[in-house]
Amino acid sequence: MIDFSVVKTTLCQWLEDNWDHKFLHWSRDNLIDALKIAASRPSCPLEHEDHEHFLGSLVALPFNPTAENLAAYMVDVIGPQLLDQYGVELVECTIEETSKCHVNYCK
């Protein structure tokens, strides 16, 4: 058993800091380099702040960031990293893409 405030300050905060409003991409995706180059060109319509925001929003993941893979990563990797110290285990994660489309991963 764990107090919800611990979940909020660990898992929820981790999600906010690392994935929320970010451009998640597979580290093997070669198109990301092309996007970075295009965004750096003088002809790119992005303002300096937007360019920096774009680059700061890129998050390379060691897997294809499908909803299924994100849920599994939360349970298998992030949960243990963040919750082991509290003696609890994350055993299930649901990722909702829309109100009618979601995936559930159970350990």
Image (cartoon, grey):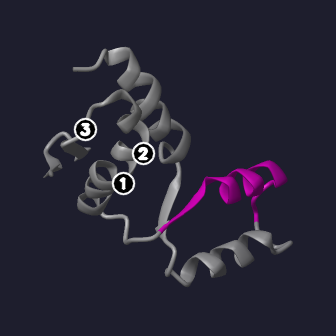
Frontmost residue, 92 versus 23 = 92
The percent position of residue 100, horizontal first and vertical second, equals: 13, 44
Q: Which mark is residue 89?
A: 3
Q: Are marks 1 and 2 in contact (CB under 8 Å)?
A: yes
Answer with mark 1 or mark 3, whichever residue precedes in sequence.
Answer: 1
The magenta stretch is 45-61
Quarter where residue 46 is shown: bottom right
Q: Are marks 2 and 3 in contact (CB under 8 Å)?
A: no
Q: State the residue position of label 1.
A: 77
The percent position of residue 60, horizontal first and vertical second, equals: 54, 66
Residue at the image point whose x is 50% and y is 80% from the top:
29
Label 2 sits on what residue type?
A: Gln
Q: Give the CA separation, mark 1 to mark 3.
A: 11 Å
Callout 2: 10 Å neighbours few (<14), some, many (20+)? some
In the rendered view, does 94 fall on the left or right side of 19? Answer: left
Quarter of the image for the N terminus: give it: top left
Q: State the residue position of label 2.
A: 81
Label 1 sits on what residue type?
A: Val
Frontmost residue, 85 versus 107 = 85
Q: Secondary structure at mark 2?
A: helix
Callout 1: 10 Å neighbours few (<14), some, many (20+)? few
